[in-house]
Structures are given as structure tokens and as C-alpha cells.
Image (spheres, coloured by chain):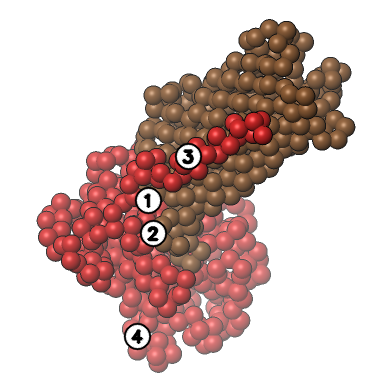
Amino acid sequence: MNHCLKTTLISCLLLLLSIDVMAQHKNNELEFAFGSANGLIKDEVFSPLNYKSSGGTLSLHYSRNTKRDHVFLLSVDLQTLEMSTNVSDQFGSDLVKLNMEAAYLFRLNSTDFRNTSIFLGVDFHSNGNLITYEDEYTLSSSGTYVSHRGIGLQALASHAFKKNAVDLRVKLPVIGKVYRSPYNQFTKTMNDEQLFAFIYKNGDFGAIHNFLNPSVAASISRPLIGKLDIRLGYEIEYLKSSVYQPITNFQGRFLIATSFKF
Amino acid sequence: MKKFNLILILLGIFTFSIGCEKTILGSDEANNPEHIFELVWTDFDKHYALFEVKNIDWDSLYTVYRPMVTSNTTDDELWEIITGMLQHLDDEHVKMRIPSDDPDNYIEFASGANKNLHALDEFSIELIASDYVEALYQKADFYSYGKLYDHNIGYIHSIAMLGVNPSVIYQSLRELGDVDAIIVDVRNNIGGQDEYSAGFAQAFSDGEHFLYTVQTRNGPNYGDFDAPLSVYSYASKPENYTKPVVLLTDALTISAAEIFTLNMKAFEQVTHIGDTTSGAHSDVGPARFLPNGWTYEYSTMKYLMPDGKSLEGIGIAPDIYVQNSRMDIVNRRDKVLEFAIDFLSDQTPE
């Protein structure tokens, strides 16, 4: 069994175990979300052209309220989008966005304000964008990536009504490393076996001045049946990086989520 | 309804913003002949890897070709001007295309390709299948193999260095049985992946040999390259074929097929017969896009031989030069293959 598989299995086991232990507090929430996404993107390593993107998104979130009413969050977001230009329908490309994070948010206001909660905290995240193009006829291809792994700030405001709750969440990666495609997109040391090693050895310092990636999400939720809630939300994400070569991405996504409280 | 206000505000902001593409991404590239020429010339200037090893004065080509483009230049004229400039690179990995869903309307230019097209008429796999080989078995990977008539010699022809697992060649060697020699024919081989080439050649390896170094351009200056990566042939395996081998090449043995040739030439029992290879070693670079719908690509790497020299645009010379003419093939004779058979017959037991 290779190292990667072992790590994955152990991580899953630990996660299941932790969920089981935490379930005794009855203040955990597991949420599955899906939806649609649209946006604009220009990656100057990939192409000098402006592209539009549209596609689908899937997310899995876990959150837990601690005894002190702070919040611990884990989430994985996947977006798969098709990119197009106004120039030619032959330039269709694919964009995959994969974001993972663990966050801990501290409650700022007193628990006496039962209907309104305001949290501020930090996250450790790994956000990645991968763009690929392939012409099946000529086998001509292209591919670029940008990834940020580091620490960010998050703020969450939540207000509960009789049946519904409204959330507003803001995220801002602050400091970390930016991993970007090489100058000519590919080098000989990036063959299949060494790809991930190459990517994570070739990062550069990234902070707000050269990697700006804020996002804002608003959502409304209400009980569905039993321990299930339903949530509707909309998120806007902006990315502008000047590390190595510029990339700009503006993305909006509409989400429908079901959450299970336990 | 108030509860939805936040969502509606965000949705409104996004809907408004998505209409402001120029504000967010900046203006799209202009689609006019002069700007397109500038985009192509500059992109090559910043990314093409072989100006120095090919001794090309890219600036002087600009001074020649740029004045030919005006705002009134038609698409056809622009195509002729740009491909005319790229022709000087004499590099078959430099390509320009007008893509189309209709193959009849798909137009492609490859720099320096014309000089090697004669090799298409100097080789025929159909002739070999019908007149020289008992039965030619086709593999899913792009090669076929069989035994020659009247000789205990195996024949393998590869048309492309592509496939899932190059070690499938070992199975073909077992099926050929105890042949006295093998002819490995990579004439008209269009290339593929270097890693596949090295894996395919491993079946004939007599050990690890230093073959070449490869570097990728990593900056705006012509001399900006990453650290050289030394490439060796794969180690020998006990089941390797160690009897005499002839490798056949021609002017259309290109790219990864030339990497295969470099591997094979390093092995003691291999004799290289045929014509000099194409001389296009670099990996093809990424697809590039233009605002008029054209695409292009270029070489981004330089391969240097152990003596430090590049064979880009030069090719790999055979140990013994033999070339078919078009009329040889028309008259159903493959003189190159026949020479290889005679050469091996002299070396192998009756």
C-alpha cells in the first residue's frame, strides 16, 4: 500500500472517529451542497484572451460548535467549468477549482445575543485552479495552474429568525505560498510521477499584495424535516495574482445545500 | 423577503460585474493584422527555446517581415507573412493552425516540414506487409511486428511513440521467438512521448548510457533555461534482446522517434541504417491562442548531446547511409530494408 493511500485511510478513520466523539455534543453539522457557477477568467500563462466560464459545483462542509460557542469548520469545494472565448468556439477549455480548508472562528459577541452571532477567525486553506485545453484532432494541448496554500482570515455573521437563519461569510487568504505554472507551462521534471512534488517544491511567497483572493457568501437556511436543514446561498469569489504571471478570476456561484445536525 | 436581501445583493453585484468584463479582466486582445503579428513575434521572442542553438536572428526577421503587415493586410496575406517568418526556424515543432470542425477546412503549417516530405514516398508499410514479412501483427500501441520471409529475422515497425505501456514490446519479442536478429524500423514515425521511446528501447538495452541533457526555457532572455536534466537509457533486463539489431530511420523519423534513435544508438548490438532523422527533438510547447481564431505552438526545450552540441535542424546521422527513391517503392522494392537484411545475414548463422 503506498504512502498516499495509507495517509488517506488514516485521515478518513480519524475524521470518522472525531465525528463519532463530537456527535455526543449534538452540535455538529454536516452539509452537502451543489449548484452552478459562472465567471470570467484571464490567465496570461495560458492565453492572452479573456474567457467566460460556467459549470457545476459540489461541496462538503462539516462544522462544530464548541462548548464556548466557537466554530470549527472543515470544507471541500469542487467546481468544474467550461471556458469559452468570444474569439473561436475551437478554443473551449476546462477549468477545475478545488478548495479545501480548516477554520476556527471565535465568537466575538456575547451569547446573550441569542439571535445574532458574529465570529472572526483563521483558516488554513489550499485553493487551486487548473486550466486545461486539448485539441483531440492534433493532440495540441495546454495547461496551467495557480494554487495558494496558507493562512487566511474569516468572518461569519449569522442571524436567526423564528424559523430561518441568515449567514454572511467573508474569507480572505492573507499569507502563504503561491504555486504557479512554470514559465513555459511544462518542464521535463514535471512528468506524471513527479508532478505533485514539482508543484509543491516550486512555490513563491504570496500575500495580499500579490495574491488577492477574497470571497463573500450569503445564505439563508430553514428546517426541512427532522434534523435536516435546507440552505440557499450565493457566493462571489475574486482572484488576482501577479506571482510569476498575472491571473484574474471573478466567479459567482449559486448553491443549494442540505445539512444534517447531530 | 428581507432575509433574501443579502443573497439578492450579491447576485446583483455579480450580475452587474459579469457585464463589466473589460473592467475586471481588461480589454480583450485586438483582432487586427498588426497586433496579431506583434503577438506572435513577441510570444516567440519570449518563449521559443532554440534561437541560440539554431543561430537565428529573430530581431532581423522582425525588421524584414513586420513592414509587410499593415492595417489593410488580409487574413491570407497575414498567414503567408507569419508562416514565411516561421519557416526560417526550420523546426517541425513550430506549427500554426486555423482550426475547424471540418477537417477539409483545417489548415496547418509546420516549419521546415516540406524538406522532409519526400520520405513519405520512400517508405510503404503496405509493401513490407505484402512482400517482405510473413504476417504483420498490429499492436494497440502504434507498432506492428512479424518475421521476414526466408530469414530467421524479426521485423518491428513503429509509426508513433505513443501507447499506454511500452513494455508490451517484451510480449512481442516473445512471440517473435528465437530469431537471429531484429530490424526495428522507425521510418515515417511521427514521434510521441520521450518516456514511451525510452521504455520501448529498453527491450534492447545493454545498460544505462548517458544520452543527452534537456533544459526548458524559463525566462525572457534567449539564454534563460532551467538546470540541465541528464537523461540516460534504461537499464538492461534479463529478458532483453541482445542479438544483432538494425535500426532503420528516414527524414520523417521525428521528435520522440529521434529520442528512440538516440537510445538505440547507444546500445552495442544496434547498427543504425537509413537516412538522417528530421532534427526536431524538443517537446512541443503549449497551444497558443490568437484573437483571430488561429493557434500555434513552438519548441520550449533544448536537447544537447553529450558533446554539448544540439542536433535541432540537423538530425541524427545513420552509421550506414541508404535511402530509397520514390521509384524504388513504385517498383515494389525497399532497398533500405533489403540492405538491412543482407547486413544482418552476414552477421548471423546460416
Q: Do the residues at discs 4 and 3 belong to one chain?
A: no
Q: Which residue sits at x=68%, y=32%?
A: A220
Name the chain under label 1: A
> Decide: marks 1, 2 in contact (CB < 8 A)?
yes
The amino acid sitting under disc 4 is Arg
Residue under label 2, please give it: A87
Q: Is residue B326 left or right of residue B167?
A: left
Left or right, residue B289 beside residue A138: left
**Label 3, label 2: how far apart the Cα atoms are:** 20 Å
Using residue A116 as the reference point, say whether residue B185 is left or right of it.
left
Is the C terminus of chain B in the top left, top right, bottom left or bottom right quadrant? bottom right
Q: Which residue is mark 3?
A: A250
CA–CA distance between discs 4 and 3? 58 Å
Looking at the picture, which amino acid does disc 2 mark?
Answer: Val
Near mark 4 (Cα within 10 A), the count class, few <14, some 14-19 or many ≥20, is some
SS at badge 1: loop
Q: What is the chain identity of the residue bearing mark 2?
A: A
The disc placed on residue B326 is 4
Query: Taking A95 as reference, is A8 above or below it?
Result: above
Packing grade of label 2 (10 A; few <14, some 14-19, many >=20) is some
What amino acid is labelled 1 in the image? Leu
| Figure colour of chain A | brown
